[in-house]
Structure formats: C-alpha cells, structure tokens
Image (cartoon, rainbow, N blue to C red):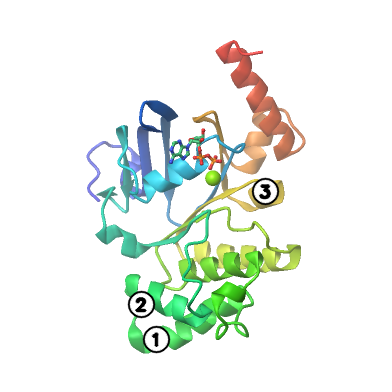
Amino acid sequence: MEDTTGTDRGSATVQVSRLFQGYGRTMVLRDVDFEMQGGEILALIGPSGSGKTTLISTIMGMMPPKSGSVHVLGVRMPNREQLGNIGFMAQTDALYTNLSGMENLKFFASLQNVDKRRFAESAMHAAKIVHLENALNRRVAGYSGGMKRRLSLAIALIGDPEILILDEPTVGIDPELRREIWSELHRIADQGHTIMLTTHVMADAAQADTLLMIRQGEAIAKGSPEEVKEQYRATSIEDAFVQAGRDQDAHLGND
Ligand SMILES: Nc1ncnc2c1ncn2[C@@H]1O[C@H](COP(=O)(O)OP(=O)(O)O)[C@@H](O)[C@H]1O
Ligand SMILES: [Mg+2]
C-alpha cells in the first residue's frame, strides 16, 4: 500500500478510521479509530451490547460504514474478493448441520481458495488444533455447542489466512483446549498474520498484544495489557476495565 502521509499507516493490515456505524437511525459505534499490524493479536473487550460484533461485521464488510472507513490489507471494505484473505468466525455458528464436519470444512475451504490438492492435509491440521479429528465424519446436527464452536474455529483457520477475525472464539471451550488454541494463535501471529478477537474472558485479554476496550460504542482505551493496567492504576485488566467505564461515565456526566 502506498504511504503518502508520512506516518507508518502504510504498514497497517487493518485500518479503521473515524468509523461511525449503526442500524437505521441508531448509532452504535462512534468515532472508532485504530489500526493493526501484521503479527499483532488484538483483543476487543467490552460489555454485551457495546458494539463488538458490529465492529467486526463492519471490518468484514457485511455493513458499509455510516461514515469513516475500514481498510483490510490496503483495500477499502466492503470488498468481496478480500474475504478470501480473511478467516472469519462469527459469534453465531454458521454451519450446515445436515452435513458432516468434514463436508463443512470442504465447503468453506472452497470459498477460501484452499488448494484442492492440499485440502486433506489442511483439514486435518485445522481439525487437530481444535481436537475434532475424530468427529469429522459425524453430522454436525449431533455436535454439542462447544464442538460447533470448535468446528467454526477450524473453518476460520483452514485457509491459513493473512487476517483472522474471531468473534468470541473461546465461548464453550474448556481451559485446557483454550490454552492450546492460544498457543496456536501465538504461532500464527509469529508468522506475521494479524488476529483480532472479541472476548469476555479476562484471561484471554491478558494473552493479547493489544487490548481495545469498547464501551457504549466508543473505544475508551487501547494499549498492551500492561499499559492499560498502568493507565488506570489497576492491578488487573478487569479493574482497569471497570475504572475506564467510570471515567467514561464521569466524562459523559452519567451517574
Ligand atoms: N441487526 C441489528 N439491528 C438493530 N440493532 C442491532 C442489530 N445488531 C445489534 N444491534 C444493537 O447494536 C448494539 C451493539 O450490538 P453488538 O454489536 O452485537 O454488541 P456486542 O457484540 O458487543 O455484544 C446493541 O445495542 C444491539 O442491540
Ligand atoms: Mg457480539
């Protein structure tokens, strides 16, 4: 991407600029502005209803911004072709329950331009990460909630995408598997890929390079977990988050 601004914006893999977004007349995101670099893991944290999924849907190009812009790998979203470079896991599993896990992987891999000759290998690799390799021939209708979540994650990973966007990937996943998934996410980031995820779990947030706290549609804090804790003189991310909320209320004149 050409950089004419003299800043390092040109190296951003995901760039969200002065984004306003909403549904109908209701504004949900106000002036959200941040960027990510290759190799970075960013955790978007915020209460239910704060606009995390709306932000992710906008980055994916499912909703054009009301104003402001989103660029992924230098391309302005929405852009259908760019979706081939993004591994996406939605908050609500979008799976074909009448098909087997393997058939789901095959279908979504075909949308992600996965090399057909390497499909079997890629599918097995992705399935192993989420411990589903022995359930792939079963119909998804018989999967538990956690298994569906894990299949959705495997689908997001299968194309080895440049950008990974995961909406609550650890919901319904036990602590041991959660740890293994984190070690895989770190490995993927170490290869220069960009990962953005949402979470309610502070232990997940602590694993990220960068936290972006969002509350009532505004990005209220951004930095490494250590920086965010320091900024709010908090001993935990959870305390920092609560304190950030109080500051925002005081600023807005809320009680
Ligand atoms: N399709 C929609 N139509 C209207 N309002 C919506 C829609 N989706 C979400 N919202 C509203 O937008 C706000 C943010 O929702 P969401 O982005 O899902 O938050 P989060 O993912 O942080 O829980 C909430 O007030 C929610 O009710
Ligand atoms: Mg959500």
Residue 247 percent across, percent down from the top left: 63, 19
For label 1, count other residues whose C-alpha is less than 10 Å away and answer few (under 14), some (14-19) or many (20+).
few
Q: Quadrant of the C terminus?
A: top right
With 172 as the anchor, is 209 left or right in this view?
left
Q: Secondary structure at mark 2?
A: loop
Residue 15 percent across, percent down from the top left: 36, 43
In the rendered image, which residue does mark 1 sit on? 118
For label 3, count other residues whose C-alpha is less than 10 Å away and answer few (under 14), some (14-19) or many (20+).
some
Is there a contact, CB below 8 Å, between mark 2 and mark 1? yes
Give the quadrant of residue 244. top right
Identify the residue at image location x=72%, y=28%.
233
With 237 as the anchor, is 106 left or right in this view?
left
Identify the residue at image location x=34%, y=49%.
62
Q: Secondary structure at mark 3?
A: helix
C-alpha separation, residue under disc 2 versus residue under disc 1: 7 Å
- Using the image as rendered, state which of residue 37 and residue 43 is in the foreground: 43
For label 2, count other residues whose C-alpha is less than 10 Å away and answer few (under 14), some (14-19) or many (20+).
some
**Which of marks 2 and 3 precedes in the sequence?**
2
Compared to 41, does 147 lie above or below? below
In the rendered image, which residue does mark 3 sit on? 206
In the rendered image, which residue does mark 2 sit on? 114
